[in-house]
Amino acid sequence: MLETTETVRSEYEPVQGRIAWIEQFTDQDKLYVISLPDDVELDHDPGQFVELFVPGVGEAPFSISSSPTKDGPLELCIRAVGNVTRALDSMEGGDPLGIRGPYGTGFDPEALAGDDLLFVAGGIGLAPLRSMINYALDRSGEFGDLTTLYGCKEPAEQLFPEELQRWDDSEEMAFYETVDQCPEDQTWEGREGVITELIPEAEFDPETTTALVCGPPVMYRFVIESLQEQGLADDHIYLSLERNMHCGRGLCGHCQINELYVCVDGPVFNYPEVRDKSEAEV
Amino acid sequence: MTVRAVADSSVGRVDGMKTLAKSEFETLIDGLIDDDPRSVVGPQRRSGQYVFEELDSAADLALEYDLTALSPKKYLLPQYEQLLTYERTDGEYEMHAGTDTEGVIIVGVHPYDLAAIEHLDKVHIDTMGDEPYRKRREDSLLIGLTMQSVAPESFAASMGAATTDSGYDLLVTDIGDRFVVDIGSFEGNELLADLDTHSASHSEVQEVRRIEDDLRGRFERELQFPPEELPTLLAEHYDDMEFWESYAEQCLSCGSCNMVCPTCYCFQVETVRDLGGDSGYQQRSWDGCLLEEFASVAQGENFREEVAQRHRHRFMRKGLYVYERYGDVSCVGCGRCTRHCVADVADPTDVYNDLWEATNA
């Protein structure tokens, strides 16, 4: 027989949270604001994720959109594309659900301190980056210049529209946005084109800038190339990668990129950590 | 590593060995079956193959076995295991982590399976703190058995797992008319307390050594190189897609190699609901990286879409990835994947030796 020390509680037992309110951004995307019991402190790093359990349906991983600099409820921006997320889509304020976490390696604000930060968010990739963007805005004294680039398919797919407007108006952060294209039945006065076109336009000093990138899988290679063309060194690039972080604990194997477990070693990686991993697709 | 610490304690291998009559060993097992609240399981003959199953009597033990269909992993990391139960009452959910974590007494475990369990311990207890596994493992007893029949698919000797001096509570060696027993833990020692045993003589210990030495030369399959070379060899051939495709061509993506592997521990989690929908449980079940959807995400992207990618991943994991993370090559050479692969493309000695030849030709 073996003997080891007792741990406090099972890692597989969620705490019960409750949907405080829901904000609808697009046909598919909603912000779920979730209150946790008073005695539970999430205490997360920007870029970390939680496992969300919808009783009777299942569990899935979601990056935390709220910043640890803000007290208050947990915010998850979720697109309805799978079993769990479609079930969530039919839920209302007051409904209970389970939360485990936070898990993974997020952004390290201490390591980024003093850097100019360039956020590059494509589509739903804004959800995890928003945590760090708001962290940097709330503690802007700790960082250099802040710039956010955001691109989505069309105007109707914009996430956090009111917040985007505030960022656009803000003196604290430069903000550039684009849509891939604007269908005729929508109006858009901004620019059209893919997100990589914003990179040469944004003003940043490659020597002092760190880029934080999150978007759909197809986006990474192009964004990284474009950042390199602007003179950014590889280790000045951080990527938040999405995989099926099913257990969140480095065991179930579904999120593996070569030998890396995204749920433990990531989801945030310094680019050189994954540059040569073919399964990272970056 | 906890297991080794226990096994290497004051009861040393040589001077701690005992001898007992086979009838005494049966008395021990029958006593455990009758009196111990835990299940007692061991290798038995069923429908033309050997399997670990619950024992009704020590007489049912098939200690002559070469290889069982599944390894005793199935008792420590069950194929289906409840992680969480939930119940709704008045709009509130009660959620409790919980599973039946009672241990088992596993009799007749060969050294390669003991090595596999040591590896699972390292991952689930020492590193990742998996509570269901830890509780069940700590409540379990392993009675090892020196292997004397060698399955044609096995290459455990090449992986250094044909014999062992750790990872068991007791290790039994059949020396003809009696057993020599090595004591690996305090609990193992306790098991022998009421039995008629005597200290093994020098010649009895020598006989155990002779059996072990003789065994290593009886494997039909072997690696042509030391397993320590595997991580480097695999890393060198990662991008050799032509090689991986040559194996993957015939692969059916059935996942059998994963299911029968004593060191595979990947799982999926699913929700099982009662008919009313107000209660149910989350269960984890064995999953396999050869299965097509293993690396898919909700939005449809499959990060290991090609069979060759999944095939490569399995071998990389066994010989490189797990090594980088835990310092173990996680193949013990049991040969189960070879035996159960319908397409005959899972044999690690084929794959690894081919790579070796490609490098050293």
Image (tube, coloured by chain):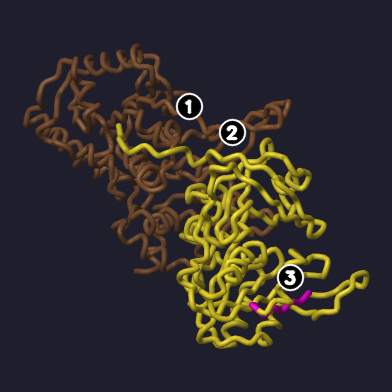
Q: CA distance from mark 3 to mark 1?
A: 50 Å
From the viewer's perspective, is residue A186 above or below residue B133? Answer: below
The N terminus of chain B - image quarter: top left
Between A186 and B142, the residue placed more toward the observer is A186
| Residue tagged 3 | A164
Circle 2 crowding by C-alpha within 10 Å: few under 14, some 14–19, many from 20: many
Task: Residue A152: give x, y in percent of width and height.
Answer: 75, 70
- The magenta stretch is A172-179
Looking at the picture, which amino acid does disc 3 mark?
Leu
Circle 1 crowding by C-alpha within 10 Å: few under 14, some 14–19, many from 20: few
Q: Chain of mark 2?
A: B
Q: Quadrant of residue A91?
A: top right
Q: Chain of mark 1?
A: B
**Chain A's shade in the image?**
yellow
The C terminus of chain B - image quarter: bottom left
Q: Quadrant of residue B76?
A: top left
- Judged from the image, the secondary structure of the residue bearing numbered disc 1 is loop
Mark 1 or mark 2: name the one nearer the start of the chain: 2
Task: Residue B120: give x, y in percent of width and height.
Answer: 38, 43
Decide if residue B76 is on the left or right side of residue A5: right
- Judged from the image, the secondary structure of the residue bearing numbered disc 2 is strand
Decide whether the magenta segment is chiefly helix, strand or loop. strand
Q: CA distance from mark 3 to mark 2?
A: 38 Å
Q: Which mark is residue B255?
A: none
| Residue tagged 1 | B100
Are the two marked residues, 3 and 1, in contact with CB atoms closer than 8 angstroms?
Answer: no
Q: Which chain is brown?
A: B
| Residue tagged 2 | B95
Same subunit, labels 1 and 2: the answer reads yes
From the viewer's perspective, is residue B71 above or below residue A104? Answer: above
Instruction: Answer whether residue A189 is magenta in the image.
Output: no
Are the two marked residues, 1 and 2, in contact with CB atoms closer than 8 angstroms?
Answer: no
